[in-house]
Image (cartoon, rainbow, N blue to C red):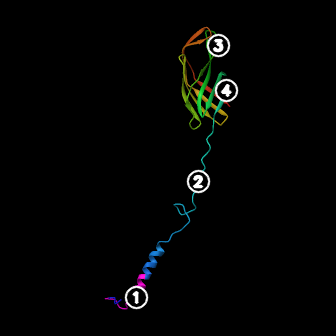
Amino acid sequence: MSGRGWKGGAAWPALLAVAVAGVIAGCGGSSSPSSPSGGTPATPTPTPTPIVYDGSWSGQTGEGADARFTVANNVVTAFTLGQMFQAGGFSCTVTTTLTSLSVPIASGRFSFPFRTSELNTNVTGTFGSATQASGTYDQVNMTNLRCGPATINGFKAGGTFNAAK
C-alpha cells in the first residue's frame, strides 16, 4: 500500500489489527447469571400449600346453641345456626339449616347472607387452622318465627360461634 498522505505504509495493517482486537475484546461477556444488582441471584420463594378445610365442622354459638357447617372443595355447602329465644315467659331454641350453599373460602374466610322466610342475618367465618374456626353473625331479624306456642317478630343482637373439625 502506498498510503497517500501516510508515511510508512506498513503501519496501516497493524492499526487495523489493533482496532479489530479491541472490538472483539469489548464483545466478551460472562457465562454465569447474576442478579440485577450484580450480587448472587435471588432464591425463589416457595409457594405455600393451601390449607384444605373440607369436612364437617361443629360447635356452638356464644349462647350455647348449635353452630355447624360442611365444607367440600373449600366451599361452604351447608350451615346450621341455632338461636335461643325468650318469649312469653318461656324459652326455646330454634335451629335453622341452609343447604345447597356455594360459599367460597378465600384467604381462610367466608361470608354470606343467612336468609329464610322467618330469619335473616349475615354470617362471617374465619379459619384459625385446618381444624379450628370462629365467626360472627349480625343482628338477627325475625318475621313470624315460631318458638313453641309463640310467634316472634322483631330482632335480637348478633353473636359469635366457634367450631372444630
Secondary structure under tag 3 reads: strand
> How far apart, in angstroms, are the residues tagged by discs 1 and 3?
113 Å
Q: Residue at x 64, y 25 (%)?
A: 68
Query: What kind of residue is marked 1?
Result: Ala
First reached walking from the N terminus: tag 1 or tag 4: 1
For disc 3, the marked residue is 91
Q: For mark 4, does the 10 Å Cα neighbourhood hold few (<14), some (14 to 19), or many (20 or more) residues? A: many
Q: In the image, is residue 17 part of the stretch drawn in magenta?
A: no
Image: 37 above or below 137: below
For disc 2, the marked residue is 44
Q: In the image, is residue 9 part of the stretch drawn in magenta?
A: yes
Secondary structure under tag 1 reads: helix
Q: For mark 1, does the 10 Å Cα neighbourhood hold few (<14), some (14 to 19), or many (20 or more) residues? A: few
Mark 3 or 2: in front is: 2
Of the pair 41 and 87, the residue shown nearer to us: 41
Q: For mark 2, does the 10 Å Cα neighbourhood hold few (<14), some (14 to 19), or many (20 or more) residues? A: few
Q: Residue at x 57, y 60 (%)?
A: 41
First reached walking from the N terminus: tag 3 or tag 2: 2
| Residue 62 appears in the picture as rendered | no
Q: What span is colored magenta in the figure? A: 4-16
Mark 1 or 3: in front is: 1
For disc 1, the marked residue is 11
> How far apart, in angstroms, are the residues tagged by discs 3 and 2?
60 Å
Image: 99 above or below 105: above
For disc 4, the marked residue is 59
Mark 1 or 4: in front is: 1
Left or right: 38 as drawn, with respect to 20: right
Image: 44 above or below 89: below
| Residue 162 appears in the picture as rendered | yes
Place of residue 135 in the rendered image (x, y in percent of width and height, measured from the top left): 60, 29
Q: Residue at x 47, y 73 (%)?
A: 26
Place of residue 141 in the rendered image (x, y in percent of width and height, measured from the top left): 54, 19
